[in-house]
Image (cartoon, rainbow, N blue to C red):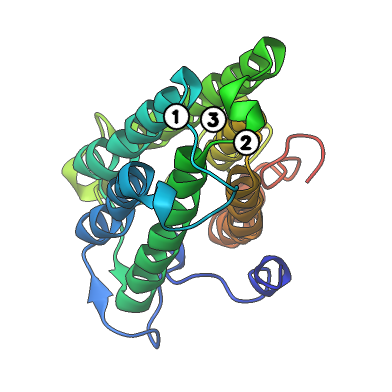
Amino acid sequence: MLTFPVLFFVSAPYGKLVRDGWGGRVDGRLGWAVQELPSPIVMTLAFVYGGDVLAFHDAAQTPSALTYTCVAVWWAHYLNRAVYYPLVRRMSDTTVPVVLMAVAFNFVNGVLVGTELARGSAYLTNPSPPVVALGAFLFVAGAALNIVSDATLRNLRVGRPAKDAGKHFVPFGGLFDYATCPHYLGECVEWCGFAVATQTQSGWAFAFWTFANLMPRAVAYRTWYKNKFGKTYPASRKAMLPYVW
């Protein structure tokens, strides 16, 4: 809970906000892959073996089709984020502490989510089709927004001369006309959808953590853009939630 307010004052040193004084630097693409890949691996191991290790319920249940689907979409998300994402874009350096903290978080989160899915629950065994449909819609819509927004950012440098390789540009189009970080909004919606579909404690905790981590970072990025581009940056843009915040 304390992470949310703290991150409004101390931004994690990676990406555009990387800075000295936070330990050694790591190539952004390598660091990103290293910190994200443990999540699907650990979650799957916990799903396969964790049902008899951490008891969320009295007895393990036979995994339902919903739980297997959740494992599959978790892998789909992280194959995109941990493998494809760093391969197709230029990324600023990250720092060793950020990578280590992300690895630790992804390890714990993977264990909790995978184990709770493996243990099952009355809901996971007999889910409500309308609730699952709503969760699936939110997950797909959030993932689409995240992927499309990432592509918009990536394409900002396409076709520009080599001398502009290290420069930053203001994105326009889609929700970028209303918010600085719609890609962050997409990820938040995505994991809210996962939590809605599964109705798991760990799913809701992950959705909250995603928002608590990305909302302050979106505010910091909005400040960064305003400081770098001055009056040319649209003052009406919110940080992550269009028209709201």
Residue at 34% over, 29% down: 76
Q: Earlier in the sequence, mark 1 or mark 3?
A: 1
Instruction: Identify which residue, 37 or 159, lies in the foreground.
Output: 37
Q: Of helix, strand and loop, which one carries label 1?
A: loop
Give the residue type that dot 2 points to: Ala
| Image spot of residue 47 (x, y percent) | 37, 43
- Left or right relative to 21: residue 179: right
**Label 1 sits on residue:** 62
Q: Earlier in the sequence, mark 1 or mark 2?
A: 1
| Separation of residues labelled 1 and 3 (CA atoms) | 48 Å
- Crowding near pointer 3: few (<14 within 10 Å), some, many (20+)? some
| Separation of residues labelled 1 and 2 (CA atoms) | 20 Å
Q: Are marks 3 and 2 in contact (CB under 8 Å)?
A: no
Which circle marks residue 195 in the picture?
A: 2
Residue at 31% over, 34% down: 80
Give the residue type that dot 3 points to: Phe
Q: Is residue 14 visible to us here?
A: no
Q: Is residue 54 visible to us here?
A: yes
Judged by depth in the image, the label closer to the viewer, 3 or 2, is 2
| Image spot of residue 132 (x, y percent) | 63, 18
Give the residue type that dot 1 points to: Thr
**Label 3 sits on residue:** 172
Residue at 36% over, 27% down: 72
- Quarter-of-image position of residue 204: top right
